[in-house]
Image (cartoon, rainbow, N blue to C red):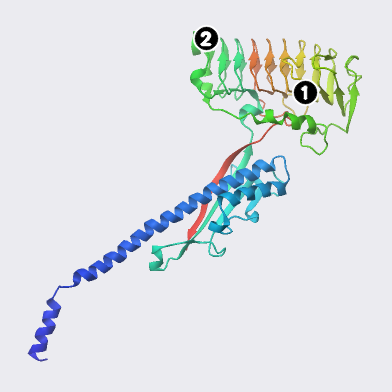
C-alpha cells in the first residue's frame, strides 16, 4: 500500500472526533427505553388500578342487588355500574355480563366456586387484551417492539353477618347495662353511640364491647377494676344497622310464601283474624297458621294469656301487645306495627326460643316498629328482638343459649344477666341483612 494511503487510514483510525455523536445516539436510545418503561408501565399500572376499583364497585353492586332480587336484576344493576366506571369508549369491552359469576367462597382454601343460584359471593373479572381488541397501548416502548399490555383484574366479594348482629346487643343509641352481669366468650355489645356499664360485670375472653370511640365508654368511679375483662373486650367501629330498614319487608314477607322471610313451619298462608278481647291462649293459636290481631286505635291493647305456648305460628298485630307470665315462643314470630314506646311488653318468665342446647329450630323472633319492655326472668334460647324503639329488660335475663337484640334506640338491662354465644346454632331463622366485604382482589396477568 502506498505510503500516502497508509498515512490517511492510520490518521482516520486514530481520529476520535465524532465519537460523542455515536455515544449520544446510544444514550438517547437507552433514555428512551427507560422513559418508556417509566411512562408506559405507569400508564399500565394506572389502568390496572382503574380496573381494580371497577371490579370492586361492580362486584359490590352485583352482590348487594342479588340479596333480595333475581340474578338478572342484579346483573343489570352491576352492568349499569360497569358502564360508568369502565366506559366502553375508553376501555372497550373490558367487562361484560359474562364476566360476572355468582357462587360461593371458601376462605380456607381461598377458592371461588360458581353456583348460579347463590347469593353468597360473586366474582367479577375485567380484561384489556389483544384478544378483546382493547389492550392498553404503549407509547415509547413501541421503539423496541413492545406495542401493548394485556391486563386482567378480578375481585371476589362475599356476604357476611357481623358477629354482633348474629348474637349480642346492637343499638343505634346508648347501651346501658348495670351491675353483676356475665358476658360469655364472643357475646357482643355494640352501640353506634356509646356503651355505659356499672360495676361487677364479667366479660370473658373473646367477648366484644364496641362503639365508634372507646373514649366515650361510661364507667363507674372504680373504672375497669370492677369490670373484669372489659378493657380487653373493647373495640372501635360503627355499623349501619341495615335490618332496621327491612321491617316493612319482613312484615309483608312472613305472609308471602315466595318471600325469604316466610316461615317453613307455616302450612297455610291465609291469615286468621283474631278478636283482641277474647282469651288468647293455646286454643286460639294453632300450629301452621298466620294470625292477625287488629286494633282500631294505637292505644288499644291485646294480651297473650299466661303460660301460653306459641308454637309454629306467626302473629301480626297493630295493638299494644302484652305477653302474660311464662308465655313461651318456639318456632314463632310476632310482628307488631304499633309504634308505641312499649308496643310489646311481658310479664315475668317470658321465654323466647326452645331450651335445647343450641339445637336446630325452636327459635323465636319479635319484630316491632315501637319499643319493647320485659321485667324479671326474660329467657332467650335462640331468640331475637328487633325494635325501632328502645328495648328494656330487668334483672335475671338469661340468654345463655343464643340471644340477639337489635334496637334503633337504646338497650337497657339491669342486673344478674347471663348472656352467651351459641354461634348462631338454633338461630338459623333470625332476620338478618347481609353485609359485604372483599374476599380477594388480584391482578391475574400483565403481558405483551
Few, some or many residues within 10 Å of mark 2 (<14, 14–19, 20+): some
**On the picture, is 440 further left or further right than 19?**
right
Taking depth in this image into account, of 168 and 322 the one nearest to the observer is 322
Q: Is residue 57 left or right of residue 381?
A: left
Foreground residue, 14 or 388?
A: 388
Give the structural element (helix, strand or loop) at label 1. Answer: loop
Indicate which label's residue lies in the foreground, 1 or 2.
1
Residue at numbered disc 2: 220
The residue positioned farthest toward the bottom in the image shown: 2
User: Residue shown at 13%/83% (left/top)?
Assistant: 9
Question: Image quadrant of residue 20?
Answer: bottom left
Q: Looking at the image, can residue 360 be seen?
A: no
Mark 1 sits on what residue? 337
Q: Is residue 4 visible?
A: yes
Looking at the image, residue 378 lies above or below residue 58 = above
Residue 169, image x, y percentages: 64, 22
Dot 1 or dot 2: first in sequence order is 2
Amino acid at each position: 500500500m502506498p505510503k500516502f494511503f497508509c498515512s490517511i487510514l492510520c490518521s482516520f483510525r486514530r481520529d476520535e472526533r465524532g465519537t460523542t455523536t455515536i455515544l449520544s445516539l446510544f444514550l438517547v436510545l437507552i433514555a428512551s427505553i427507560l422513559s418508556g418503561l417509566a411512562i408506559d408501565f405507569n400508564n399500565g399500572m394506572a389502568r390496572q388500578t382503574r380496573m381494580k376499583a371497577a371490579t370492586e364497585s361492580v362486584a359490590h353492586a352485583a352482590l348487594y342487588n342479588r340479596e333480595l332480587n333475581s340474578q338478572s336484576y342484579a346483573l343489570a344493576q352491576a352492568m349499569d355500574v360497569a358502564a360508568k366506571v369502565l366506559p366502553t369508549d375508553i376501555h372497550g369491552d373490558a367487562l361484560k355480563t359474562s364476566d360476572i359469576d355468582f357462587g360461593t367462597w371458601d376462605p380456607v382454601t381461598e377458592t371461588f366456586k360458581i353456583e348460579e343460584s347463590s347469593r353468597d359471593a360473586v366474582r367479577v373479572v375485567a380484561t384489556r387484551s389483544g384478544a378483546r381488541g382493547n389492550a392498553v397501548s404503549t407509547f415509547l416502548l413501541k421503539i423496541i417492539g413492545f406495542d401493548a399490555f394485556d391486563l386482567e383484574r378480578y375481585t371476589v366479594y362475599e356476604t357476611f353477618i357481623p358477629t354482633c348482629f348474629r348474637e349480642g346487643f346492637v343499638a343505634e343509641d346508648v347501651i346501658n347495662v348495670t351491675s353483676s352481669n356475665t358476658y360469655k366468650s364472643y357475646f357482643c355489645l355494640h352501640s353506634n353511640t356509646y356503651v355505659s356499664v356499672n360495676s361487677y360485670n364479667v366479660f370473658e375472653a373473646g367477648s366484644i364491647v364496641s362503639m365508634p370511640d372507646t373514649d366515650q365508654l361510661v364507667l363507674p368511679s372504680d373504672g375497669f377494676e370492677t369490670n373484669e375483662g372489659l378493657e380487653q373486650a373493647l373495640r372501635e367501629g360503627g355499623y349501619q344497622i341495615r335490618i332496621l330498614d327491612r321491617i316493612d319487608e319482613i312484615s309483608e314477607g312472613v305472609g308471602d310464601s315466595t318471600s325469604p322471610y316466610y316461615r317453613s313451619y307455616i302450612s297455610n298462608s291465609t291469615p286468621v283474624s283474631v278478636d283482641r278481647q277474647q282469651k288468647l291462649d293455646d286454643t286460639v293459636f294453632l300450629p301452621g297458621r298466620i294470625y292477625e290481631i287488629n286494633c282500631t286505635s294505637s292505644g288499644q291493647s291485646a294480651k297473650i294469656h299466661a303460660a301460653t305456648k306459641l308454637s309454629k305460628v306467626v302473629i301480626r298485630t297493630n295493638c299494644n301487645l302484652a305477653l302474660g307470665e311464662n308465655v313461651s315462643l318456639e318456632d314463632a314470630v310476632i310482628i307488631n306495627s304499633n309504634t308505641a314506646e312499649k308496643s310489646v311488653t311481658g310479664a315475668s318468665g317470658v321465654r323466647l326460643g326452645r331450651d335445647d342446647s343450641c339445637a336446630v329450630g325452636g327459635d323465636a323472633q319479635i319484630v316491632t316498629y315501637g319499643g319493647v319492655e320485659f321485667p324479671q326472668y326474660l329467657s332467650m334460647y335462640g331468640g331475637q328482638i328487633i325494635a325501632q324503639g328502645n328495648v328494656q329488660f330487668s334483672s335475671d335475663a338469661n340468654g345463655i343459649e343464643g340471644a340477639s337484640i337489635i334496637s334503633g334506640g337504646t338497650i337497657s338491662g339491669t342486673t344478674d344477666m347471663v348472656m352467651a354465644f351459641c354461634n348462631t346454632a338454633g338461630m338459623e331463622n333470625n332476620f338478618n341483612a347481609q353485609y359485604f366485604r372483599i374476599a380477594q382482589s388480584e391482578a391475574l396477568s400483565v403481558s405483551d
